[in-house]
Amino acid sequence: MLWRGDIGQIYALLNGGTVRRYQDTWVEGDIVAVDATPPSGMYQPERGFGKVWAEDEWLREQLGWATAPEEGYTMRMQSSGAYRYPYTYMTLPDDRVVYVIETQWDFLES
């Protein structure tokens, strides 16, 4: 999951190349909880990610538990409106680049 603070959206990048976008409605103090405990070595998503994950059972089933704690970083991003469907390029914490077109995503090959 990626958070775009500039537009207040959360992108859930799903296996198979599908992306779902959610408005980030989480505010400081919101309690995010599910009626389950993560397996050993896994984590419950937190804050905006956690709210979306907890409220959307389908998404929770698709993603499962987080494999690492939430990590903040400065995302580099570029949008291209030159096509019928604009591309949005975003960096991941490991500097790989993903691009999103409408409801699809993939890694940018270097």
Image: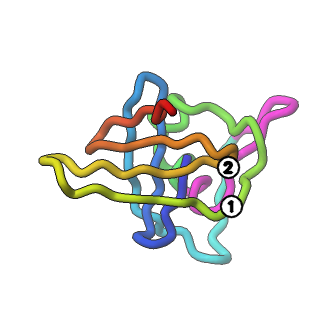
Label 2: few (<14), some or many (≥20) within 10 Å?
few
**Is 68 located above or below residue 41 in the figure?**
below
Amino acid at the residue labelled 1:
Tyr
The residue sitting at the bottom extreme is 28
Which of pointers 1 and 2 lies earlier in the amino acid sequence?
1
User: In the image, is residue 42 part of the stretch drawn in magenta?
Assistant: yes
Q: Residue at horizontal 53%, vertical 29%?
A: 61
- The residue lying furthest to the right in this view is 40
Residue at screen point 12% across, 47% down: 84
Residue 53: % across, % down:
55, 47
* In this rendering, position of residue 17 left or right of residue 69: left
Label 2 amino acid?
A: Pro
The residue that appears at 47% across and 56% down in the rendered structure is: 10
- As helix, strand or loop, the secondary structure at mark 1 comes to loop
**Residue nearest the viewer, comparing 49 with 2:** 2
Disc 1 + disc 2, Cβ < 8 Å:
yes
**Residue drawn at the location 69% of the way across and 44% of the way down:** 94
Looking at the rendered structure, the secondary structure element under dot 2 is loop
Tell me the tag on residue 73.
Answer: 1
Q: Tag on residue 9?
A: none
Residue 1 in the image, given as x and y percentages of width and height: 55, 46
User: Considering depth in this image, is 59 or 102 the residue closer to the camera?
Assistant: 102
Residue stretch in magenta = 36-51
In this view, the residue in front, 48 or 74, is: 74
Q: Nearer the viewer, residue 15 or 49?
A: 15
Please state the horizontal and vertical placement of residue 89, each as a whole percent of the image: 42, 50
The image shows residue 77, relative to residue 94, as above or below, that is: below
Magenta span: predominant SS is loop
Is 14 situated above or below 4? above
